[in-house]
Image (cartoon, rainbow, N blue to C red):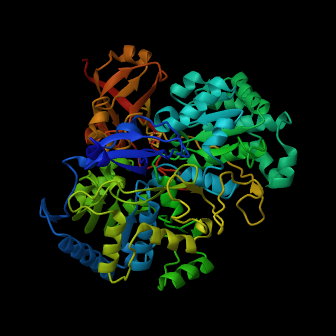
Amino acid sequence: AAMRHSRIKKTKTVCTYCGVGCSFEIWTKDREILKVEPQVDAPVNSISTCVKGKFGWDFVNSEERLTQPLIRKGDRFVESTWEEALDLVASGLQKIKEKHGADSIGFIASSKCTNEENYLFQKLSRAVFGTNNVDNCSRYCQSPATAGLLRTVGIGGDSGTIEDLQKSDFVLIIGANPAESHPVLATRIKRSHKLHGQKLAVIDLRRNEMAERADLFLHPKPGTDLVLLSAVTKYIVDQGWHDPSFIEQRVNSFDKYLPSLEKFTLDYAEEITGIAKEEIIRLAQMIHEADTMCICWAMGVTQHIAGTDTSTAISNLLLITGNYGKPGAGAFPLRGHNNVQGASDFGTMPAWFPGYEPVEHDEVRARYEKAWGVTLPKKPGFNNHQMVEAITKGKIKAMYLFGEDMALVDSNSNYVESAFEMLDFFVVQDVFFSRTARYADVVLPAAPSLEKEGTFTNTERRIQRFYQVFEPLGESKPDWVIIQEVANKMGANWNYQHPSEIMAEASKLAPVFAGVSYERLEGWNSQLWPVAPDGLDSPLLYTERFGFPDGKARLYPVDWTPPYEPGAEYDIHLNNGRLLEHFHEGNLTYRSKGITHKVPQPWVEISPELAEERGIKDGSLVSLTSPYGKVEVRALVTDNVAKNELYLTMNTTDENQAVNRLTSSYHDKITHTPNYKEMSVKLEIVEVE
Ligand code: SF4
């Protein structure tokens, strides 16, 4: 028995299923996962996890894993050696670069992969190929939140930690469903609310679990959050409930900002949002009565054509009430993917080097040129949305994408797929043969987190290390190893032996990571950026200064843009979002038996009134049609949703049920984030039961 026990290995890892960043030990014997054991030392979750963290790992041994490179031969894919595949990747990309220039290649990075892998990928794009056409999937989710914060407070991340959410007097959750999308973080709020007198308000289209618990639940008309928030802000200022000394000392442009609030009277807000004046006043009162307020938001705010402006309105409200820079207060855009924060932080963005320094800035570029020994492009590149458009115009001819199922997760997938068909050369690197891989010329097999080392950055800006549990399956390799091999095939001379060396390089170049190192991140230790050279990190931002040269925040006037409407025949609003049990497009969780037996397929939520009107029952098969496509899915009749509003769960691997068959190519004006949450559809019954 002792012998058998000694073969059990315990390895610390960090969960890859959401931005909360839980860490735990995984117990394994050979390639078998025995259990997941959270530890009190885990900085975010202590002894908790959710169902995904606990049961979501069987996919690593799935028979469907890619274990060898694949090369397209006509309509088929054939297995190849690494040598052959990498030669083809290098020669294919080189040919396009010579013929059409570096800017004819697009690079799509992965918010599921490590900081080090994202750092290397942007270095590959910029230093080896010479283009800033590199982006990651935060463009599909949280870019508007980042942009709203950069406008107002200067740093694009949560302003505090989960502990601040726990301590806060008042938490406002808007357009987010943390009980399903960020479960362990939601548990902290639930506990404070239940046991410690914390007040909770929820603004959402759907009566989700947090809305059920909330002291106040407001359901505005779709796409009108900005009006509601601005009316609350105006009411607070009108009552003299704002924080004049905070504004005086720490905030610029109050006088310029005030006139922008004028139109957001209670009457106007009631008319546009459908929320009664008394309710708007009640929300303002709750904010006034709280010494500290945190606002959490996610895709329900960002995935609109006014996503950046609404995020800005949130930050304005926090500034007006002095809710930055003190414990228990601040802005909390809840990051979806485990490393969506880190992918952007480490520079896979078309306009920014790691640490949000502009590529256009000569001094910054000179620093990177010196370190990398190359001349770098000055002009910002295409973002992923623009890349798709550029393919259809013949400007982008080749792409290299890793760890991202863009065909399924970008909006308007019929359009995206038709663009992929037009590429001359496409390299896809993933753990599974994803839907996007079907369009590839070369598919490179990657290793998931349990088969490599690295760091992830969670929603709090917390950088955490994880350690290797298994050897990569078959001939798959860690993404950083593959990226380095591609770079070297292209004539670079990279020689990273371990991800720690990549982090060491990034921390030398990007001031916000100055004191980040693998030694300081050993075991359960973590660091929240910005990190000073001596290793001092920043759990709470803005205690002294905001992220602008003069140290002051900026109130930023915004106006309301009505949401996109496809036309009168599409008469039912369609919302969408995650399920507790599944992660994103489901490539991993649908291959984890412990999860799939619980929730095998998606569904659409329909209100009892609408169901009755259309003769729909629980389990009926219904079709949803938009101007862009059609899906068929089973109905769930529930009063979670209001009369003419549907909610489609988005986690599916079945392309015929994917919400992005229906979504459009309209997007946020500033960041180009698609307006996934603004769609109306025709609803028809296919089969009663
Ligand atoms: Fe993983 Fe998020 Fe669940 Fe924590 S809350 S276990 S990070 S999915």
Look at 27% across and 59% down and name the residue there.
Answer: 472
Q: Nearer the viewer, residue 574 or 102?
A: 102
211 versus 263 height, above or below: above
Counting from the top left corner in percent of width and height, residue 384 is at 42, 60
Quarter holding residue 75 = bottom left
Quarter holding residue 489 = bottom left
Quadrant where the image shows the C terminus: top left
Quadrant where the image shows the N terminus: top left
610 versus 61 height, above or below: above
638 sits to left or right of 547: left
492 sits to left or right of 43: left
Look at 61% across and 76% down and name the residue there.
Answer: 361
Look at 32% across and 16% down and name the residue there.
Answer: 617
651 sits to left or right of 640: left
Counting from the top left corner in percent of width and height, residue 366 is at 57, 82
495 versus 401 height, above or below: below
Q: Nearer the viewer, residue 197 or 678?
A: 197
Does residue 222 appear in the picture of this structure?
Answer: no
107 versus 218 height, above or below: below
Counting from the top left corner in percent of width and height, residue 44 is at 55, 44
Counting from the top left corner in percent of width and height, residue 613 is at 39, 15
Quarter holding residue 468 = bottom left
Does residue 434 appear in the picture of this structure?
Answer: yes
Circle count: 0
